[in-house]
Image (tube, helix red, strand yellow):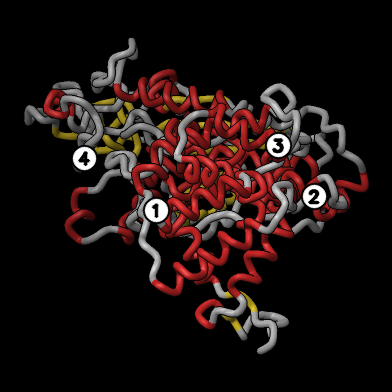
Amino acid sequence: MTAVPSADPALTPELRALAETATAWPFEEARKIVERLKRRPKDEVLFETGYGPSGLPHIGTFGEVARTTMVRHAFHILTEGKVKTRLLCFSDDMDGMRKIPENVPDRAALEPYLQMPLTVVPNPFGGGYASFGDHNNAMLRRFLDTFGFDYEFASATDYYKSGKLDAVLRQAAVKYDAIMEVMLPTLGEERQATYSPFLPISPVSGRVLYVPLKAVDADAGTITFTDEDGVDKTLPVTGGAVKLQWKPDFGARWAALGVDFEMFGKDHQTNAPVYDKICEVLGVEPPEHYVYELFLDVNGQKISKSKGNGLTIDEWLTYASTESLALYMFQSPRSAKKLHFDVIPKAVDEYFHFLARYETQDWKSRLGNPVWHIHSGNPPKVDMPVSFTMLLNLASASNTVEEDVLWGFLRRHVPGVSAQTHPKLAELVVYAVRYFKAFVEPNKRFRAPDDVERGALEALYAALGTLPEDAGADEIQNALYDVARPIPRYQDLKAKGATPERPGISVEWFNTIYQVLLGEQRGPRFGSFVQIYGIPETRALIREKLD
């Protein structure tokens, strides 16, 4: 991904006119912000994303920044770059550690620090970071920097302690009763009896306390409560002596910073009206929202930072490019999607598919193409002669984890191809070898053919032997069809254009090939695969499995 440009070379009146009606979701959201500016003119628009550093950052966290950047660029186009924008990534690192994450070393060592602010909890990972919160913040920034995002990082601890939130905290003390009127109806009876929007940081233990308040002095800007030692204490609401409960904190931060746009996961959707009301109580119009669906793990469960049950940022980048991950974030953000290793190959191939289409599209279509949003209006030109799936199947058929072996097949397909002539293909070869070794090779499950399948594969072996070694993909594919067409099991009379004399070919024939020859459930277009892998090599593979 690229940062929002200061001067987009394609920013023309014609492009802006098309953007006014573009249907891609970033444009739909950007138009809401344009309308907002008509109601509330300002010189600078603030986009915000939130991060809870209670665990290591995962890809869902990145998704918020990537998607918000896409909306920010769409807004840049709609306003012809005339309105300054900022993206603030805000870390709620002053929150108390409510539970110890499952994926940290020496969990017992963190037990004494439960309920303390995350920037006070010792860092269990080492590496020179002062606290658990500092470590996780650094992990987030490192990854955002990898993608070249144009953003500013903000720490709640810094904002509370430096006084940047003092004005809104004093206002919250003044509006204490109004905030309670918003909050109490959302709570159960027992919780109502002890609830306070202000959470004091205990001078005795350093913990974030969930205790009822005995007094709120709006004029003095103080709260009084009973500390853990049983003694009543009075603290200022400013300077980091207290923090706000998370729901009031959401709305108060919007008010303090003047946030214009923020997106968040579906788990916040029911609370969004509360955030809005708090912001309004504090005298500021709440920002525009975008609610996205949550990511799921391989078992369909919500991914969690504390459980570590989803893909990490580094894991995706071990097996695929940053652009493929950005594409995954762009597509259908309001649909729940599985975030596991098996989604990577499809994401990689779809990215290059959209990139290839971009060159032939008119501007209206380009504004709906994901790569325009991923690259902030400047997609690169890339020649990708084979797919990631094809590379994985070449590795599978040859049972190799050697990059040179794959390059041998590729040079047969594209004479003279090399890492120097096709650098993006070179990256893909590296990723394919890693992915094959980690996920394909350990899970290959070959099965023996039954009598019908054995006869069909023998016929395919013979048919391939009649073709010249330099036969094209279509010629090979037609031979594949001709072998299957007379076999009742593989006939599909419901296929488009099928007739009893010339039936279509059912997917069962291709499943036979993939499962018996490659040990996989699916594969590439077989004609293209054989053209690259080689007819003699494919016949040898068939003979090996039949024997």
Q: In this image, 180 relative to 335: left or right?
A: left
Disc 4 to disc 3, C-alpha distance: 45 Å
Q: Secondary structure at mark 4?
A: loop
* Pointer 2 residue: 366
As drawn, 129 above or below 320: above
344 lies above or below 20: above
Q: Which residue is rendered at x = 67% and y = 61% of the image?
A: 477
- Picture quadrant where residue 4 is located: top right
Disc 1 is placed on an element classified as strand
- The image's mark for residue 210 is 4
Other-residue count near label 3 (Cα within 10 Å), few / some / many at <14 / 14–19 / ≥20: some
Q: Nearer the viewer, mark 4 or mark 3?
A: 3
Side (left or right) of 183 relative to 3: left
Residues at badges 3 and 1 in contact (C-beta under 8 Å)?
no
Say whether disc 3 or disc 2 marks the residue closer to the N-terminus: 2
Q: CA distance from mark 4 to mark 2?
A: 52 Å
C-alpha separation, residue under disc 2 versus residue under disc 1 = 30 Å
**In the rendering, which numbered label is found on residue 296?**
1
Q: Which residue is mark 3?
A: 375
Residue type at tag 3: His
Q: Is residue 436 left or right of residue 468?
A: left
Q: Position of residue 455 (x, y in %)?
A: 48, 70
Residue type, numbered disc 2: Arg
Q: Residue at x 68, y 58 (%)?
A: 466
